[in-house]
Image (cartoon, rainbow, N blue to C red):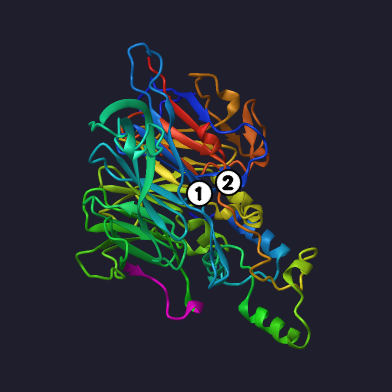
Amino acid sequence: MMAGVGGGNDFQWCFSQVKGAIDEDVAEADIISTVEFNCSGELLATGDKGGRVVIFQREQESKNRLLSRGEYNVYSTFQSHEPEFDYLKSLEIEEKINKIRWLPQQNAAHFLLSANDKTIKLWKISERDKRAEGYNLKDEDGRLRDQFRITTLRVPVLMPMDLMVEASPRRIFANAHTYHINSISVNSDYETYLSADDLRINLWHLEITDRSFNIVDIKPANMEELTEVITAAECHPHQCNVFVYSSSKGTIRLCDTRAAALCDRHSKFFEEPEDPSSRSFFSEIISSISDVKFSHSGRYMMTRDYLSVKVWDLNMENRPVETYQVHEYLRSKLCSLYENDCIFDKFECCWNGSDSAIMTGSYNNFFRMFDRNTRRDITLEASRENSKPRAMLKPRKVCTGGKRKKDEISVDSLDFNKKILHTAWHPKENVIAVAATNNLYIFQDKIN
Amino acid sequence: MQDAVVSPEKTEEAKLKARYPHLGTKPGGSDLLRKRLQKGQKYFDSGDYNMAKAKMKNKQLPTAAAEKTEITGDHIPTPQDLPQRKQSLVASKLAV
């Protein structure tokens, strides 16, 4: 079966690495909740339900390694958010990291934003490979020297030391969200970023933590009239005045911050017309958009709803230009998926570096890739069974009815607890990171 | 194009309505949204708490220590009873 998705006919995805524990009992805190490459692809960050961030760094390419690209090794890990309690509302504030977004690199240090439900933090990750030795007032182990014993003055010298990577919180952006933050997005001006919760979107300046501008507010005066919530938001990759936000009703609004201080009136409204005769109880729920991502070119955007991924041309509001079915066979299972809450799962989606392919997750640790040019699609599985170094990934197929062929899996055998909600594609190369509950898989293309 | 067969979605909807006849008529409506907005375990309602305190006014309030043995449905939690949320002191298993 053709596996040429994402880069031509000779293309094959291979296993590269898997990180995380093997044991069956998954601790809640270990569940990965976000995955993100930095702008160069050198660093890969993950956030988990326990509020921790782990950053991996790619090995330097060496001439000795001919068969595979550099591996990702642990670079830094820190506790980003801690559980809190809102005493006024008697509600717990989860430490789960909802989103991580990297800032473009401007000096030797790396910066990222991490957000839980209520607070966003700017973290600085820097390297230290030298330390000063020969202090006058203290010993090498830090103890103060007896000042009467000091008879000479010396200049401390910088000596090399083992590389130490330090993460420190530089800004804490708190108390601006009444509802739960679902998105953060760094603006192309590198000065501001937006954060979105269920009903509001705020614009922040990276240097200023004690205030933010509210730019979208869809809270109705009477909460009984609430019909829709904000599900995701993103800044345009090049136009710093443009951003989009998606809703639980399957619509996307594009806003221009030059038009008004409060962008409650959209500049563009994207919605696919629905056939009213096919409407069911589930229609609105499955149309809810769980993720929205601009293409790198800035000309298109992609949305993920429960059963499909849609590509929209920003110049055409009345329908998407491309629609890809992720797992259409689930349409006849909606009743049980509603009962076990899976119908509310929020899948993310991502573009490859050249915008020629898109990827999104599914159940049973399956993930799907679609090549926009060839219209080919493939289903792959993140599994330890296929985790020998450089092992080629075999395409997977779900059997929807009738006779099940060998190697196919029937819809009823799918494990709905094995969800792939978070995936990331290296900005320049064919390297992908796939989060499967508490494990992180890295796959890359075969070097011929 | 008209379907001769009933769409799978409508079949699923009929199944759901058969199991839960009192399910809201408004599809996906504001009940679901409001449940989504208030995600997270609510430990107590201040109204319930104050009602319970008023009821107990004439009796001596039992100390939190004595009640630690059994928490029943009638028990109104006080801040001392809440399980302490400790931060994760264990490093992520991804970083091994």
**Quarter occupied by the C terminus of chain A:** top left
Q: Is residue A184 left or right of A434 when viewed as pictured? A: left
The residue indicated by pointer 1 is A51
Q: Amino acid at mark 1?
A: Gly
The residue indicated by pointer 2 is A29
Q: Earlier in the sequence, mark 1 or mark 2?
A: 2
Residue at 40%, 14% in the rendered image: A67
Q: Is-magenta flag for residue A223?
A: yes
Q: Position of residue A346 (x, y in %)?
A: 50, 51
**Callout 1: few (<14), some (14-19), or many (20+) C-alpha neighbours within 10 Å?**
many
Looking at the picture, does residue A341 appear above or below residue A223? above
Q: Chain of mark 2?
A: A
Q: Is residue A15 left or right of A164 when viewed as pictured? A: right
Provide the secondary structure element on which disc 2 rests.
Answer: helix
Q: Report whether mark 1 lies on the same chain as mark 2.
A: yes
Q: Pointers 1 and 2 in contact (CB under 8 A)?
A: yes
Residue at 22%, 54% in the rendered image: A240
Q: Is-magenta flag for residue B85?
A: no
